[in-house]
Structures are given as C-alpha cells and as structure tokens.
Image (cartoon, grey):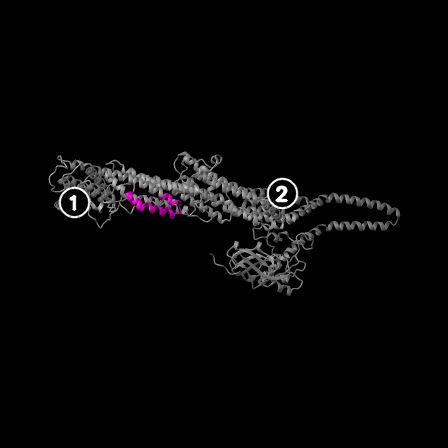
C-alpha cells in the first residue's frame, strides 16, 4: 500500500510578474512524482497545464495564461497529494502589443512573431527565432523588475519596435553591464546601419543632377525668348514649337529611360515579392517542413504549424496563399492517412494507440479513429487466439520433432508479431506445472515398492496443457489494454483539448452512445472464443459439430491426466481473476465460470478413473512380505493411492468466489459415487486375483525377508516360493485389515473432501469385501479341514477296530492325536501370518472335526462297555484340547456325539476315564500349549 503524500506547496516563482505567455519557473514542495502525477496547474485562475513541463518534485516550468491585468495564486494539483496551496503571487500585466496583421507605422518582423496560442511545451518550428540584436553586442539582461521600469519611464517601452521606445530603458534592460568601449562599438554599429540606409537615396539624387540642371536651363531660355518677341504671333508659333519640343523631349526621355524604368519596376516587383516571401516565409516553407518533420516523427511540430497556418491563412482570399495552403492541406491529408495506418497496425502498445488517436483528433480526421482502433484490436486478439490453436494442432498432427511453445507460435504467427513487448507471454512468474506434480513417496509400511520403470515421461507437459497456458497468457496480456482503450474512449480521455474547444467532443459523445452494445458483443466474442478453444482441446464432447470443426481438431489425443487437468483448472481460474480485476461485467464472464465448473467435474471424474486403473496395477507391486500384523504393503499402497488422488483434487473441489460446488448436480453426485465404489472394487478384484495367482508365479525381485518376524517357512537361503494356502492367508489378512481400518479411513477421506453418498460407498464396498472374504475363507477352510476330517474315519477303524468288541482302553488312540497335530500345523501356519485369523480358522476346523465325529458316533449301532469308554475318552479329550475354540454350536455338536455313546454305569469306569484323560493331557501337554488362552490375543467368534 503506497504512502499518502502531502498536498503541493508553491514557495517561489520566477519572474514574479510578466505579460501573457511569459515563461516562469515554479518552485516548491511535493509538486508531484512525475509528469503523469501532475493533473492541474493554474496561475491567476488560468489553466496552464498544457504548457507545464514537470522537472522534479520541487520544480515546474510553464507559460502563464491569457492577457489579464490580474494578480493571483499559483495552484498545483497532483494525483498523489491533491490540490495544493501557494505562499507567493504572480502579477499578470497586459502590454500594448502590435499584431502581425495590424496596420502600424512601425514594421513588425515576422521572424520575431511567436504564436504562443499553440505552444504546449512541445517541439516548435525552426521558423520561430529570437529577435535580432540592433546594437551588435552581447545581451546581458539584468534582474530589474518590470514594474520598476514602468515607474522610472512612465508611458515608455523598452521594445525598439514600439512608438514609445525609450533607449535608456532598452540599455538598462539589455546591456546594464556593458562597458564604455562596448557602448562605443554599439554606437558605431548604429551609425553604419543608418549610413547604409541613406546611401541609396543620396546616390540616386547625385546621378540625376546634370539632367535636372539641363532641364532648368532649357526652360529659362524658352521664357526669355517669349518675353523678347512680345507679339501674339510669336507667342502662337512659339507655343506650337514649345509643344513640339516638349513632345519630342518626352518621347526622347521615354526612349532613353524606358529600359532603366523597366528594370526599376522589375526590381521593385522582385523586391516586393522578396518582402512577401520574407514576411510570409512560414507559410511558403511549411509544406517542406511538414515533410521533414513527418519523416523525423515530430508529429507535434507538424500539428502546431498546421494549426498556426490554419488560423492565419485558412480563410485568406489571396490566390498565392490559397495555392500554398492547398498544398499544406494535401500534406496534412497524407499525414492523416499515415497516422490512421499506424493506429490500426497490430501489435501496438496502448500508449502509441492513445497518441495516434490524439493526433488524429487534433487534425480533425474524418470518421471515428478510436472506434476503428478498437475494432482492429478485437480482430487481432481473435486472430492471435486461433493462430495459437492452429500452431499446436498442426504440430500435434504432424508427428515431427517436438519444439518449444514459442517456436510453435513463431511458426503460426511469424516472429515479427510475437517479439513485440505486447506479446511477452513467457514473462509469467508462476511456478512450472511440473513443480506442482508431486511424485509418489515411499510407503511407511513394509518394504519399498517403487517401480523400476522410468516415469519421467509422465511429467512432460502435454500439448493441450501448453496450449491452454499460452492461450490464457495471450488473452491476459491483450485484453487489459483492449478494455482500458474502451474505458478511455468512453470517458473522453483519448481526445485532446483542441477537440474539446473545436466542438468535436459532441460528435465523439454521440458516437460513444451508440457503441456500448457493439463493444459488449466484441468482449463476449473474445470470451466465447477463449471458452470454445479450451473446450475444443479438453472437452470436445461439450461442443456442437459445427463448433468442433472450428475450435477443435485435436483428435483422440485430447485426454489429459488428472494432475494436468487440475493444473488447467488453476490456469483458467487465474485468467478469470485477472479479467475480474478489470471490472468486466459478470454476465460476460459467466461462460468462463461454466467452463471452470465443467473442467472441475471432468478433472474429478478423470482422476477417480485413473486412480481405479492405478489400483488395478497394484497387483504387480505385491511382494508377499508381511509385517508383525500379518499385512503386506498392499493395503497401505491402496490407501495412499486414494489419499494422493483426493489430495490432488483438493484445490479443484474447493470453491473459489462465485464458483458452484462440483457436487451440486445430482447426476454428477451419482456418477462420482459410482467411480468411488469402482476404485474400492478394483482393489478387491486385485486381492481376488492375487489369491488365485498360481504358485511360483512370483517376482523374485520383490521378495525379501522380514527380519522383524520369525522365519517359519525355511531358511533364507531357500528359493523364495509362496504356496497357494499362504497366499490365501495373506489375502485374508489384508481383507481383514481392509474392512477394519482401510475402508473406514477412505470413507473419512471422501467425506473430508466433500464427497456425497458416503454411506452408499461404504455399504457397497463392505458388501463386496465381505463376499470376497467369505469366498476366500471357505476356500482356505476347505483346503485345510478336508484332509483332517477325511482322516478321522479311516483312523477310527484302522486295524479292524470294532466298537462292539474292543479291548480295555489304555489311552487316546493315534488317529485323534494325528488330527490334533494336523490342527496344530494349521494353527501354526495361520499364527505365522495373522494372529487375528487364528480363532476364526480354528473354530471352523474344530467345527468340521466335531461334526464328523458326531456323525461317526451316531452311525455306530451299539457300543460295548470298553467301546463306550473308548469313545467317550476320545470325544472328551478332543473337546478339552480345543475348548478355547468352542462355540455354542460346536458344544452342541459334541454333546450330540456324547449322547450317542452309552453312559458310564459304574464308578470304576468314570475313574478310569478321568485317569486316562489326565494321562492324555500330560503326554500331549507340549503339543496342546498352542491351544491355551494367550494374553497376546483374545478369542473371537
């Protein structure tokens, strides 16, 4: 925020008084920060801004205003400080001046005439010169105030052309420091000038003295002869003779002096012509001077000279003046055409455009040059935008070597246009989009899963993203000047004070009233072109077939990844903010808002779709290395993929001012909800694929031992192979973790980022996961339980065992011990992967074994006493060994098996049963430890 400056203060002016158009120097404080900051300057109430020349914050040079016998303040007004004050005054006097066309006995030299009306602190014509020095010595003007001269010499003047000229005044004013020798030299110079003026007259008189005397003698003789005769006869004859003599003398004189008089008349005519040329040499030299100044680019000088000539000779009746002035008008017409061509030339800076419009306004150019310039700029911007697109499309379809964006634009538009300051579109200091694309970090859980493939190709800027960035830079660099030109056109700041005085402003105001709708259509056309070009590159399906032919042409390569679409969204947002800063009406910018919303929705959809595809590829990164919780890195990779995708969409989903929510459309909500479900189902499908992956199909580059857990599957030196049962267990463990943690976390992330339908996503995902988990679990149980269950019946009846005729029991038979050992192996295998799965797996295996034993017991027709004891011993031993995994259903199964066995009738059998049970527990204590409750995990049903 800039600091507020103090108001201007004028503390001094030199000189303190003077006539109209006197050049003065104003000194003070806070007189402005620059020429553009100075917006007002009045002296004695007259506006002197047009002649002001800002030198510094403490000095301004200008010329005073019109003739007024007045005394007043010097007021300076600036943008930064406002209207100022003055501590000094200036006295404006009105002298008696003789104009160049006024009748006067005193000759007014044209070379000393200076048309101060047109002096605006611009360049002046070379014809405007200083007065001559009549004394021929150096002039040293003193510092005596003009008022003192008026007091010393009342009614006199120091101007040597004035009838009231005072030599003393002139000497004091111009040669107050001259020495006596210098004054003597000046006197001699005056004498020489006077003698030169009289030499011509004296010589003429001297040359005609003899003729004069002869004529006098002849006349005297004639008179004497007349007096001597004294008669009428003589008088008559003499009169006739005298007439003849005089006629003959006249004829002879004419003959003698005709050539001389002719030369004199010619000389007088030439002298008069030279005097006219000298007096009006400004007009006669003006056509040539106009040409010279046009070539040098001094249009201000040309305009000033033209205004001067127009005021002096615009209505002249002299033929020669009319002819010369017509030539001047011809040159001015050519200048108007030249300035109009420069005005319509593109590219051009706003400063040059305003300058040319002011020139044309001062020259009273026909039509409306300012509006013509606006129209040319409008066409130029549209051409630039289409050329930008054509260059990229041509390069994309050409399949030639990849060139830089600047090279593409040079090819399509030409280097001449784009090298101008108006199109310095690579000066943007915004970060590169590559810097905003973060690469995937290593997972915290498990080992590294970075792919060995080089992914640098992902970060090469796609042509569509480059095109949008360059296109928006073109619009942002061109449209502000276009809009400012229109604002200047509306408020009239484009036109000069000359136009205001000449009445042209009424014409311009009338034109301005007719233009707002036309200009609004221009701006809308630019906005529509910008929007449709971006849609043609990124959203071609949102355009009609006709618009695709004009604004499209990108082919099937028009799809961008989610991160690049997010970058495009930010680019278009920056463009919208820049255009909003120009105070362009919101209804004109609404099409850009609609484009931003469509781009945001597309970005979210594409990102979710690409995330689902990336999730499918996670199967290639599974290394089957588990941590202490029985998990591989896959769930973490999945959660991280979803989290990174949502994080990349954070800026896209967030609503900027005047933006609508991405989720406001119900159809969009449903589509995004489906895409979120697809991501989770894609991971579930990946887990299913991994569970069915053939044994031995393992990428040995990804297999590594986890030293944090015991190596239960052999030595590290063995070939790293994974059995299908182990894969099932690992996938089951991941499914378990996915349901208990990952899905909940992902749902929280979706809700945090504003996604709708979280319950639907969670329900559908949980259902799919439950189906997969149940399917894999049943498959694993079938693999592990069937061998154990299948070995029970052969084991029971091994050696032709018969429940009706058997020996006295001595302990639990081997088939049951083998079944328990098989269950222990399953327990160990599951425990090595995931402790959480042990109760679930063991309960199902115990249930299967119990159901089989119950079936076998119920199939026995009768038991002997020893058979009943043996059967009850084995059922009770199994029930007691796996009691930790018994559920109500399993207990009911065991009870049914015991009910099928006869009850022990006497105490000795019961005692034998108890004794045999204790022996079984003692002998199998070590093996049955794994079935005992542990503090490390709780029983889960």
Disc 1 secondary structure class: helix
Residue 393 picture location, percent across and down? 43, 36
Confirm whether the magenta stretch covers residue 740: yes
Residue 640 picture location, percent across and down? 32, 45
Kindly tell me whether residue 461 is visible in this rendering. no
Picture quadrant of residue 642? top left
Kindly tell me whether residue 768 is visible in this rendering. yes
- For the C terminus, the quadrant is top left
From what the image shows, is residue 862 above or below residue 296? above
| Residue under the image location 21 percent in, 49 percent down | 934
Residue 194 picture location, percent across and down? 65, 56
Q: Tag on residue 600?
A: none
- Of residues 573 and 897, the one nearer the viewer is 897
From what the image shows, is residue 460 above or below residue 131? above
Q: Is residue 654 left or right of residue 327?
A: left
Residue at the front extreme of this rendering: 905
- Of residues 829 and 176, the one nearer the viewer is 829
- Of residues 273 and 780, the one nearer the viewer is 780
Q: What is the number of callouts on the image?
A: 2
Using the numbered discs, state the Cα–Cα distance from disc 2 to disc 1 in whole angstroms.
125 Å
Q: Is residue 804 left or right of residue 396?
A: left
Q: Tag on residue 327?
A: 2
Q: Tag on residue 927?
A: 1
| Residue under the image location 45 percent in, 35 percent down | 553
Task: Write the start and end of the magenta stretch as one range.
Answer: 734-762
Disc 2 secondary structure class: helix
Residue at the right extreme of this rendering: 232
Q: How many residues crowd mark 1 within 10 Å: few (<14), some (14–19), many (20+)?
A: some
Give the mark nearest the N terminus, 2 or 1. Answer: 2
């Amino acid at each position: 925020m800039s600091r507020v400056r103090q108001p201007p203060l004028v503390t001094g002016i030199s000189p303190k008084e003077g006539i109209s158009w006197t050049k003065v120097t104003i000194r003070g404080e806070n007189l402005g920060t620059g020429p553009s900051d100075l917006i007002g300057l009045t002296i004695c109430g007259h506006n002197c801004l047009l002649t002001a020349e800002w030198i510094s914050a403490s000095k301004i040079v200008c010329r005073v205003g019109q003739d007024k016998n007045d005394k007043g303040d010097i007021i300076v007004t600036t943008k930064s400080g406002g209207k100022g004050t003055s501590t000094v005054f200036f006295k404006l006097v009105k002298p008696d001046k003789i104009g160049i066309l006024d009748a006067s006995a005193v000759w007014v030299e044209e070379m000393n005439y200076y048309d101060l009306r047109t002096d605006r602190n611009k360049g002046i014509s070379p014809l405007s010169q200083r007065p001559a020095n009549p004394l021929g010595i150096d002039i040293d003007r003193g510092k005596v105030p003009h008022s003192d001269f008026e007091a010393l010499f009342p009614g006199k003047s120091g101007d040597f052309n004035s009838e009231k000229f005072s030599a003393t005044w002139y000497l004091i004013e111009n040669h107050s420091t001259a020495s006596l020798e210098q004054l003597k030299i000046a006197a001699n110079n005056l004498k020489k000038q006077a003698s030169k003026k009289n030499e011509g007259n004296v010589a003429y008189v001297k040359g005609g003295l003899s003729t004069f005397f002869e004529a006098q003698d002849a006349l005297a003789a004639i008179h004497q002869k007349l007096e001597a005769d004294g008669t009428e006869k003589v008088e008559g004859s003499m009169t006739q003779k005298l007439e003849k003599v005089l006629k003959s003398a006249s004829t002879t004189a004419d003959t003698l002096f005709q050539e001389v008089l002719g030369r004199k008349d010619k000389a007088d005519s030439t002298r008069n012509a030279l005097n006219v040329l000298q007096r009006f040499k400004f007009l006669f030299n003006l056509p040539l001077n106009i040409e010279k100044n046009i070539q040098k680019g001094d249009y201000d000088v040309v305009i000033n000279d033209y205004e001067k000539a127009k005021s002096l000779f615009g209505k002249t009746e002299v033929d020669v003046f009319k002819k010369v002035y017509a030539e001047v008008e011809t040159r001015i017409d050519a200048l108007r055409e030249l300035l109009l061509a420069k005005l319509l030339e593109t590219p051009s800076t706003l400063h040059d455009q305003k300058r040319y419009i002011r020139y044309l306004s001062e020259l009273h150019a026909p039509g409306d040059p300012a509006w013509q310039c606006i129209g040319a700029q409008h066409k130029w911007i549209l051409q630039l935008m289409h050329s930008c697109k054509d260059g990229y499309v041509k390069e994309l379809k050409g399949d030639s070597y990849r060139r830089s964006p600047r090279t593409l634009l040079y090819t399509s538009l030409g280097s001449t246009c784009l090298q101008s300051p108006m199109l310095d579109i690579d000066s943007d200091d915004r970060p590169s989009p590559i810097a905003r694309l973060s690469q995937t970090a290593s997972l915290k859980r498990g080992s590294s899963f970075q792919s060995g493939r080089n992914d640098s190709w992902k970060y090469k800027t796609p042509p569509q993203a480059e095109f949008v960035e360059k296109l928006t830079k073109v619009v942002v660099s061109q449209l502000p000047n276009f809009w400012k030109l229109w604002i200047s056109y509306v408020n009239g700041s484009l036109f000069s004070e000359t136009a205001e005085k000449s009445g042209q402003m009424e014409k311009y105001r009338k034109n301005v009233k007719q233009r707002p709708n036309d200009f609004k259509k221009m701006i809308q056309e630019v906005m529509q072109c910008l929007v449709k070009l971006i849609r043609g590159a990124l959203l071609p399906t949102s355009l009609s077939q006709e618009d695709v032919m004009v604004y499209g042409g990108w082919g099937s390569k028009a799809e961008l990844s989610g991160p690049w679409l997010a970058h495009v969204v930010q680019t278009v947002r920056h463009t919208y903010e820049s255009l909003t800063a120009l105070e362009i009406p919101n209804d004109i910018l609404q099409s850009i808002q609609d484009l931003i919303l469509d781009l945001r929705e597309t970005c979210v959809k594409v990102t979710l779709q690409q995330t689902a595809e990336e999730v499918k590829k996670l199967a290639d990164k599974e290394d089957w290395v588990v941590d202490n919780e029985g998990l591989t890195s896959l769930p973490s990779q999945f959660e991280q993929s979803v989290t990174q995708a949502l994080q990349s969409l954070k800026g896209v989903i967030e609503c900027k001012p005047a933006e609508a929510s991405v989720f406001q459309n119900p159809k969009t909500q449903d589509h995004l909800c489906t895409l979120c479900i697809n991501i989770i189902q894609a991971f579930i499908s990946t887990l299913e694929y991994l569970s069915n992956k053939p044994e031995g199909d393992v990428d040995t580059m990804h297999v590594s031992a986890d030293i944090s857990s015991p190596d239960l599957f052999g030595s590290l030196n063995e070939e790293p192979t994974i059995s299908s049962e182990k894969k099932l267990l690992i996938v089951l463990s991941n499914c378990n973790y996915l349901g208990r943690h990952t899905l909940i976390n992902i749902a929280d992330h979706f809700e945090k980022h504003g996604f709708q339908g979280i319950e639907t996503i969670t329900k559908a995902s949980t259902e799919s996961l439950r189906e997969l988990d149940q399917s894999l679990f049943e498959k694993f149980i079938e693999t592990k339980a069937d061998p154990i269950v299948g070995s029970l019946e052969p084991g029971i009846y091994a050696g032709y065992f018969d429940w009706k005729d058997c020996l006295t029991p001595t302990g639990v038979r081997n088939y049951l011990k083998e079944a328990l050992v098989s269950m222990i192996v399953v327990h160990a295998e599951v425990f090595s992967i995931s402790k959480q799965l042990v109760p679930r797996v063991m309960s199902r295996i115990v249930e299967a074994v119990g159901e089989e034993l119950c079936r076998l017991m119920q199939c026995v027709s009768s038991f002997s006493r020893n058979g009943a004891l043996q059967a009850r011993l084995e059922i009770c031993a199994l029930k007691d060994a796996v009691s930790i995994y018994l559920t109500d259903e399993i207990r009911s199964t065991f009870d049914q098996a015991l009910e099928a066995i006869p009850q022990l009738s006497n105490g000795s059998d019961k005692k034998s049963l108890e004794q045999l049970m204790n022996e079984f527990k003692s002998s199998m204590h070590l093996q049955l430890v794994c079935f005992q409750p542990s503090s490390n995990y709780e029983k889960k049903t």
